[in-house]
Image (spheres, rainbow, N blue to C red):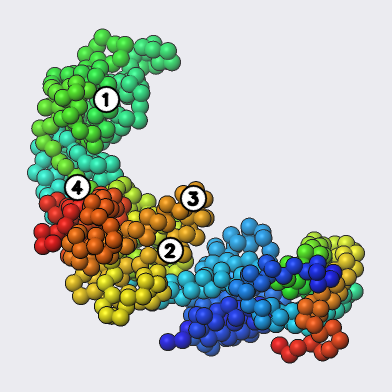
Amino acid sequence: MTTRELDLSMPLARMGGDAQLLRELAVLFLEDGPRRLAELQASLDAGQLESASRAAHSLYGLASNFDAAECVAAATSVEVHADAADISAARASFGALSTAVGRLSAALHDVLDTRNTAPLPP
Amino acid sequence: MTHTVLVIDDDRSVVVLVKHALQPLAVEIVSALSPQEGLKLVAEMSLDVILLDVKMPRMSGIEVLRQIRETNRRIPIILFTAGTHSNTAIEAMQSGAFDFITKPLEAERLREVVRRALEVQRQASVPVAVAVEEQDHRQEPSGLFVGRSRPMLEVFKEIGRVAGQNVTVLIRGESGTGKELAARAIYQFSDRANRPFMAVNCAALSDTLLESELFGHERGAFTGAERRHNGKFEQASGGTLFLDEVGDMSPLTQGKVLRVLQERQFERVGGNTTIETDVRLIAATNRPLEEMVESGEFRSDLFFRLNIVTIVLPPLRERMEDIPMLLQSFLTRYRQELNKPEIEGISPDALAILQQYSWPGNVRELQSVVRQFVLKARSQVIVPDDLPVHLCENVLTIRRVQDPTGDDPASIFETSEPPVPVADSGIFRSSLPSVDVKRFIEERLAAGSENLNEECIELIERYLYARVIDEFGGNQSKAARVLGVTRGKVRDRIAAFRIVVGKNVTVGAVDLPITGEDLLPERRSTGPSPSA
């Protein structure tokens, strides 16, 4: 996903045009997104469906702030499979989610213009 | 006083978003990133609103909600969820959530819901204006037949006078005024109280069926009459027969009923045997029988037979002082029936709206409204937010701003600030909400309105004209000059909006003025007050 593909007009409208708030949420995604993804992977590896579902749900929530459809859809898929106790399907969906989180992170980095610097403090 | 809002969500971006979104409300935000931490804060702190995520580690938001509700039924709890499953929403509301917001969160919507929750909390914290009855003293079936107003006392007296007399009684009154209850009261206090009471609604049956229902039929009298049927005049012999909507009977049935009244005998449909009956007849109608006699729709001889004793039930708008008592009676009943033991009463603000409404459907409508708001209630006190929207739309009152600098037009749209007391108005009027355009638009949008432009303009015009006319004590010429319109236009608007000029100018889609002196028939006016 590139910055151009990331349409932030609706998210900005939901936040009442508060660009600073959107930036703060982007920073939080860059901090929490990869952490949640790692938690999800660990849960899937350990076959812990409940915590896998929660981690996927958190990623869903984080990504939905930016209307990041690809990431939201992939997180939903993992969560649904985990809730249905289908560990192999959940694991199979993880790859797509991981890619989507990476693409969204890159796009948000661009937005923040911090690709090569440390994330802004929250 | 600063209000405190607790956010319980394991996603810290939600906490950040809530802090930004609620900044204009000047509330203090405390947060908890886990259910356990949240429950601890609930136990330790004095909170005004709780925002709670549904899906969290180790304990669901619904479970947290239930735990909080075990000890605190008052605090409004708003749930967040990322999902769109209806069962979560249903479960949440069932568990006592104030409202439910889906993620991704929208700042404006969140602010609005929290503002409403705070307002409900404020209204619910003042002493209730109408409390539920501790013990149910109602005596069925006339329990609904309550009132202490002068018109109702007259009705009770009249019932007392005629109940013991074996005379036909005609009960008149608008739909929903309780005509059958009056009939039952007459029956209960009559010498026939231990004999049958039967009721037939003449408007609910076709001519043929009504005839058969009243007089019975012989076997084979018509297709489908497989066995003999005794009619109500036969079954109720020795007792009382209540004929509701008597103005809707066909001329043929009118003739037969007249014969029973005159000769106390009749024949079943398709039969030759004359049957004697001893029935006391109580009839009721909301139709203009005199006019129907004039136009030949109703037999004059039957009318005179029925019209020996007439009891007229007043419409609710002519006995507004009975509203608190009626509300108490219905509230107590529905709290029990609908299993809402937490409900304690009705807030002064909500009562004010209920007392300003014109109740075209009379007591039956009020009963239905109480049922609705008991079902909808989200806290222990019924507040304006729980009332059906049409009640608030139809009522608009002038709030005189005593602050001489209070000329900011925007101030009329505010609902969150406490009402300004008005020296010469009733205690209820002064606390009515002012025009809330935003809410009105939102609600009309949600209702799928296709005429919003006109509806909005009318809403503003109603307020504007009433306010300006009030400003000049009902003087239309002065009002016209300030408004920049002709006197004719002012007159036209007064009539169109049913603006009533009294001690206070009131306005609304009402047929009659609202309370106190304005209720007297001679005070009904669409023109200026005598003092104007």
- List x then y, in percent, for residue A64: 72, 69
Q: How many marks?
A: 4
**Which chain letter matches label 4?**
B
- List x then y, in percent, for residue B21: 58, 77
- List x then y, in percent, for residue B402: 26, 78
CA separation, marks 1 and 3? 40 Å
Badges 4 and 1, same chain: yes
Q: Residue at x 62, y 74 (%)?
A: A17
Q: Nearer the viewer, mark 3 or mark 4?
A: 3
Q: Amino acid at mark 2?
A: Val
Q: Nearer the viewer, residue B42 or B299?
A: B299
- Which residue is under mark 2? B437
Q: Nearer the viewer, residue B465 or A63?
A: B465
- Which residue is under mark 4? B314
CA separation, marks 4 and 2? 35 Å
Residue B329's place in the image compared with A102, above or below, is above
Residue B102's place in the image compared with B513, above or below, is below
Residue B216's place in the image compared with B359, above or below, is above
Badges 3 and 2, same chain: yes
Q: Earlier in the sequence, mark 4 or mark 2?
A: 4
- Which residue is under mark 1? B249
Badges 3 and 4, same chain: yes
